[in-house]
Amino acid sequence: MSATISAGELISHVLDPGSFVSWDRTPIDVTPSERYTADLASATERSGVDESVLTGEGSVRGRRVAVIACEFRFLAGSIGVAAAERIVSAIERATAERLPLVASPTSGGTRMQEGTLAFVQMVKIAAAVAVHRKAQLPYLVYLRNPTMGGVFASWGSLGQVTVAEPGAMIGFLGPRVYQALYGEDFPTGVQTAENLYRNGVIDGVVPVGLLRNLMHRALCVMTGTVRDSVSAVPVVTAAAADVDAWQSVLSSRRPDRPGIRQLLRHATERVPLSGTGQGEADRTVLHSLARFRGRPCVLFGHDRDGQSVDRAMGPAALREARRAMRLAEELQIPLVLVIDTLGASLSKEAEERGLAPEIARCIADLVTLDAPTISVLLGQGSGGGALALLPADRVIAAQNGWLAPLPPEGASAIVHRDTEHAPDMAAAQGIRSADLLAAGIVDCIVGEFDDAADEPAEFAVRMVAAIAVELRDLAAIEVNDRLTRRMARYRKLGLPGN
């Protein structure tokens, strides 16, 4: 377990040198007992601070932010009425002044000397965070060693981006309490930052020395600041994209075809996100904050590097997609979705954990999302796992991208009771990018010369440029107009005259 980082050290690592200005006033009087008064005095002398939390403002690479940092040396960073009031006052001030908020808990949880009254303070802290987020303001959390109990179960778990100190103990019920209550030791290796990251509870594990840079990159995207460097992008017309459907299917399955990771290499200010935040992670998808040609977005999509015949996307991947949708809507920055899937998981576990309902919820959430949306049909677009990420304001297709209810072999099995007719089914079902463009499902096609796998870097650059153009154009459309157009688009699909 790592040594505890003090609040002052945390502030010096996150904020620009000399920029911190305290917001703290003398803690409110909680009329403590004589023994508790002595405990508070001793904690002040030992820690050099007057409460278990410091608040204030400063700058991160010149950007003004509010900061809240726990001090573990003050009664184990525990939160009582005075500490909670200080936290809530800081959150409310950050909201009023429209400042991003960086919070860094390290705490044993509720202050036992104050009992139930301290316990319920977590409600008002969580409520203040909720109001801050509802105001479309960033809330970033850095969990330090240790973060336990009610602190982790309230404001420590509400970050839009949450990372933790390497080796930090993080959990709900402390091992000492568990042992006392149940007469046995808590399983080792569970309440660690690394384990929570692997299980999709937090987004990453970051040394404190890298924290300022991470916060800077995250804020560059989350605040929606645009540094436009969009230029014209070559796209191919429906006629130029008139390639054989089965050939597109074969091209999309090439193992060396560029995927979402290749697009991300041409993005800037990348901040990887991970999991649902609720204990689920699916390695067949990728999630990140990023900029494309200076345009901020939340990026989510299928990761072809994480997929195989034995490992297909499951319900957790779709729940992670919905997390991306909520983040984009909350911050009012665009959402870019990448479709490149051989199909959703066909398994007992996927059925029992709600695969089909998650597809339905993704579609419903995406088609009604307030934030601007772009879908990119990068390669294979098979089944409901592809459809769940499709209904966006604008849809871009790679020349050899395709969209179908099933892989052509599956369609052949249904219609012909064999897989030999897969090429014929691919041609008959209108799955090609050119067919999708003609049907109004796709808005533009990015060319492959002659196959993206043979020119991966050049293709990725063209696709990123196309995404950036769409991000720029969507920014000029008022939100209600954009939503009306999106709903009308999918309402009219397939009708005569459209």
Image (spheres, helix red, strand yellow):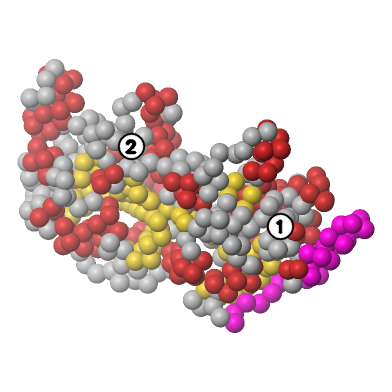
Q: Are the residues flagged by discs 1 and 2 in contact, CB closer than 8 Å?
A: no
Q: Which of marks 1 and 2 is nearer the N terminus?
A: 1
Three-letter residue code for mark 2? Met
Q: Which residue is drawn at 27% across and 50% down?
A: 376
Three-letter residue code for mark 1? Ala
Instruction: Categorize mark 1 by other alpha carbons within 10 Å: few (<14), some (14-19), many (20+).
Output: some
Quarter of the rendering occupied by the N terminus: bottom right
Q: Which of 491 and 99 is in front in this view?
A: 99
The magenta segment = 18-45
Q: Residue at x 58, y 74 (%)?
A: 12
Residue 313: which disc? 2
Instruction: Tally the marks.
Output: 2
Q: Position of residue 224 (x, y in %)?
A: 45, 64
Question: Is 121 left or right of 266, judged from the image as shown?
Answer: right
Q: Position of residue 212 (x, y in %)?
A: 49, 70
The question of residue 26 being in magenta is answered with yes
Q: Which of 379 and 330 is in front in this view?
A: 379
